Amino acid sequence: DAGITQSPRHKVTETGTPVTLRCHQTENHRYMYWYRQDPGHGLRLIHYSYGVKDTDKGEVSDGYSVSRSKTEDFLLTLESATSSQTSVYFCAISEFGQQGANTGELFFGEGSRLTVL
Amino acid sequence: QKEVEQDPGPLSVPEGAIVSLNCTYSNSAFQYFMWYRQYSRKGPELLMYTYSSGNKEDGRFTAQVDKSSKYISLFIRDSQPSDSATYLCAMKGNTPLVFGKGTRLSVIA
């Protein structure tokens, strides 16, 4: 199994509170991603990183920010959580970038289940 | 029209059945076609990938791509209860992966 650890695995919080999810990898892969998975929507990309301090937005980035100060860590922050952000959040890593002639194979963590009341 | 369409199911079959899972897509630039398997409360993992058109076989699993019809399939022969999972198709060109919504499969012993 790819060395990807997400924390916390489960969290219940209240509307308006800040939340930070952490992704830690031991594979030394350059690319890291945050997805959310919801019934009826599938996997949607929130933000991704292509190196330390290099990040970019995905298709559902509103209300989320990310930071990557070390190769191995990628943080996802909800500045003020809303009920619409109740979801399962997956971190993924890849050796090669998505913008290229390759499969873009992603290795996923086990997910962080967030409930915003 | 969504770039990738996948019937969400759920699909329930008896053990030993042949299972067919399908996706359609609209972007003719897609060249890499993948199937991810996701067990309950786990992250997705890559099951198979195919480049361009054609078939690829791996044990009980066969992936097919028909680029002329913009249609991909995953066949599972002699299905087992351990195959019960959600199967997500994913595809890309020189652009980020686009995922289908996933089909939930249950194989009943």
Image (spheres, coloured by chain):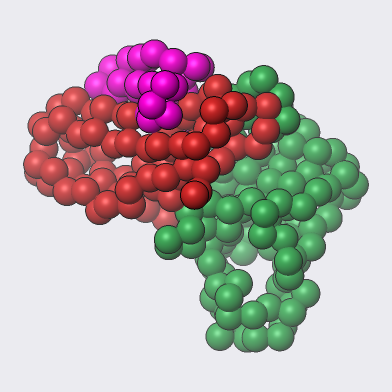
The reply to whether residue A49 is visible in this rendering is yes
Corner quadrant of residue A10: bottom right
Residue A4 spot, x, y in % from top left: 62, 43
Residue at image coords 33%, 52%: B8
Asked if A85 appears above or below B11 in the picture, the reply is below
Q: Nearer the viewer, residue B106 or B75?
A: B75
Residue at image coords 24%, 39%: B82
In the picture, measured across the screen, residue B43 lies left or right of residue B74, that is: right
Q: Nearer the viewer, residue B101 or B47?
A: B101
Residue A80 spot, x, y in % from top left: 74, 79
Q: Quadrant of the C terminus of chain B?
A: top left
Whether B55 is among the magenta residues is yes
Q: Colour of chain B?
A: red
Residue at image coords 71%, 85%: A16
Question: Which secondary structure type mostly characterizes the magenta part of the structure?
Answer: strand
Tell me which segment is drawn in magenta.
B45-72
Q: Nearer the viewer, residue B89 or B46?
A: B89
Asked if A84 appears above or below B15 in the picture, the reply is below
The reply to whether residue A73 is visible in this rendering is no
Residue B2 spot, x, y in % from top left: 50, 48
Q: Which chain is green?
A: A
In the picture, measured across the screen, residue B93 lies left or right of residue B60, that is: right
Residue B93 spot, x, y in % from top left: 62, 27
Residue at image coords 47%, 42%: B4
Whether A17 is among the magenta residues is no
